[in-house]
Amino acid sequence: MIHKKHSVIWTFFYYIVYITAQLTWGCIQSLVGFVFFLIFYKQPHDWYHGSIRTKWKTMNGISLGLFIFVPDENEPNLLRASPTQPSILKERCDRISVHEYGHTIQSLILGPLYLFTVGFVSLAWSRLNRYKQLRKQYGVPYSFCWPEQWADYLGETLLKRPALR
């Protein structure tokens, strides 16, 4: 019983430090994340290991300081894309959450440099047609790009769950 009590105290302490650091050292990206949070305020939200997770109606994920945005496994349009395999959709959404949480740790490490390093590189890697075509042409996984591989590693290491890979 004592072990569980220490675990609860440690978790509470971690959340306090995590949130405080995101709102100070990671304030730039957290401010942008808060704007996104307000834009998507009607979507479901929950706590995810200290971060505020918003589940939205797209298969894309994004991490902005204290806030992560991931696909909603209960969204009808996303379920229609894989009607025979809703469990696969849920697993993918869970893996995206682990990956995006890894980006929140990058935010804690890099602070104000996060958006200008990880943010811009990740955005280009995920959105620019040139990189989409190269990934498809050469069969390169999404995690090939350094910030994505690093986010997978951080999320998996801390949460003990698989990320995108």
Image (cartoon, rainbow, N blue to C red):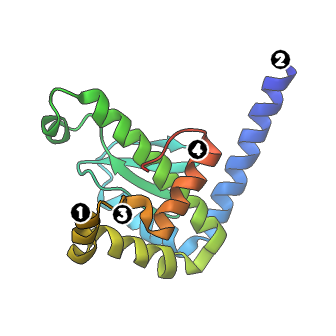
Q: Earlier in the sequence, mark 1 or mark 3?
A: 3
Mark 4 Cα-neighbour bin, 10 Å: few <14, some 14–19, many ≥20: some
Q: Nearer the viewer, mark 1 or mark 3?
A: 1
Whole-Å distance between the Cαs marked 2 and 3?
41 Å
108 over 83 or under it: above or below: below
Q: Amino acid type of disc 1?
A: Lys
**Label 1 belongs to which residue?**
136
Q: From the viewer's perspective, is the residue at label 4 or at label 1 nearer?
A: 1
Report how far apart the C-alphas of labels 4 and 2 lie in the structure.
22 Å
Image point 66% across, 56% down: which residue? 18
x, y (%) of residue 46?
Answer: 45, 41
Label 3 and label 4: CA atoms lie apart by 19 Å
Q: Earlier in the sequence, mark 2 or mark 1?
A: 2
Mark 2–mark 1 distance (CA, rounded to whole Å): 52 Å
Rendered image: mark on residue 49: 4
Circle 1 packing at 10 Å, graded few (<14), some (14-19), many (20+), is few
- Which circle, 2 or 1, is nearer the viewer? 1
Q: Residues within 10 Å of mark 3 (few under 14, many from 20)?
A: some
- Badge 4 marks a residue whose secondary structure is loop
Where is mark 2, residue-wise?
Answer: 1
> Residue 91, how many percent across, how many down?
37, 35
Q: Going 49% across and 73% down the picture, which residue do you hit?
A: 118
Residue 86 on image: x %, y %:
25, 29
Q: Which mark is residue 36?
A: 3
Q: In this orientation, does residue 155 appear? A: yes
Q: Are marks 1 and 3 in contact (CB under 8 Å)?
A: no
- Label 2 element class: loop
Name the secondary structure under disc 1: helix
CB atoms at circles 4 and 2 under 8 Å apart? Answer: no
